[in-house]
Image (spheres, rainbow, N blue to C red):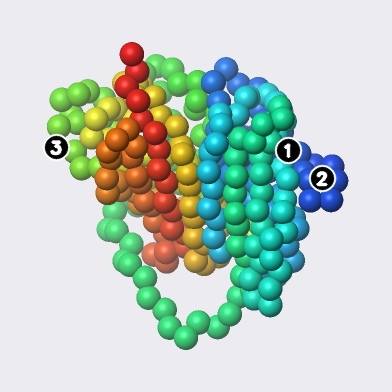
Amino acid sequence: MGSPVDNLVDLLDLEQIEVNIFRGRSPEESLQRVFGGQVAGQALVAASRTVDPDRPVHSLHAYFLRPGTPGVPIVYQVDRIRDGRSFTTRRVLGVQQGKTIFALTADFHLPEETPFEHQTAMPDVPAPEDVPSALDEVGSVLGELPPFISRRQPFDLRYVERLRWTEEELKGVEPRSAVWLRTNGTLPDDPLIHTCAVTYASDMTLLDAVRVPVEPLWGKRHFDMASLDHAMWFHRPFRADEWLLYQQESPVAVGGRGLARGQIFDRQGRLVVSVMQEGLFRRIA
């Protein structure tokens, strides 16, 4: 067994079994479903393997259709929708045990000179060195780490605001959250690995913004949740092994679904990725 970061890189290294068909490993876990960030990251790798490397991905739109089974490989079928002068489009279906569990459309763009630039400002938050590691904080309070923590071990996650552990502490809390993140080790220089690593990580904490007013983020859960869809826009190059601020908020939660949006900034304050996700929330009986 390698380090968690080595395992992440290995997880994103798909086997090509036919033209436009790839197979991804799914780790054996005690949890009920495959982690959505894993499937999204692997599907993006599959799409990227059919595109010229001089065209980086600029957006992806995905739907989580069925829960995946841990320990069972996932086959990714790539459809080459369009190869234009500036844009390339790919559609990917993730299939497991004969059923489609995931669908992704990704668009790739040949970089161009921009006629103008603007972006929203990065929030003024404490530096990552000034806030504790989430794993250290959770371990010190709970005494043990939840089983899903294995999915987060490749990353150093640091919540900007202190974690809340009781119902009383949740009163008046706004539906937003922010976390610093980077991989727990250096990644290879291949930009695709960094993009797919952040795609993996983008699903780990985004729905926290929906949950934070109603239940502690760690510990016993009152609601079962599942990602329904996921969209990302990649604005600028970045490294996933350097600190990134993931600012998250939820504009609405209604009808059993909560919508969350995120902005990922690098340490220099540049907005590098935008994210949207809707999740299903049901009270645990």
Disc 1 from disc 2: Cα separation: 10 Å
State left or right for residue 27 relative to residue 283. right
Residue type at mark 1 is Val
Q: Secondary structure at mark 2?
A: strand
Residue 214: give x, y in percent of width and height. Answer: 24, 30
Q: Secondary structure at mark 3?
A: loop
Q: Which residue is mark 2?
A: 16
Pick whichever of labels 1 and 2 is earlier in the sequence.
2
Residue 100: give x, y in percent of width and height. Answer: 64, 36
Crowding at dot 3, Cα within 10 Å, few <14 / some 14-19 / many 20+, comes out as: few
Give the answer, above or below, for where 47 lies relative to 157. Answer: below
Disc 2 from disc 3: Cα separation: 51 Å
Q: Which corner quadrant holds the C terminus? A: top left
User: Residue at the spot x=60%, y=45% of the render?
Assistant: 103
Residue type at mark 2 is Gln
Q: Is residue 10 visible?
A: no
Residues under numbered marks 1 and 2 in contact, where contact means CB atoms less than 8 Å apart: no
Residues under numbered marks 1 and 3 in contact, where contact means CB atoms less than 8 Å apart: no
Q: Residue furthest bottom?
A: 115
Q: Which residue is mark 3?
A: 172
Q: Which corner quadrant holds the N terminus? A: top right
Q: For this rendering, which residue is in front, 261 or 28?
A: 261
Disc 1 from disc 3: Cα separation: 45 Å
Q: Is residue 274 visible?
A: yes
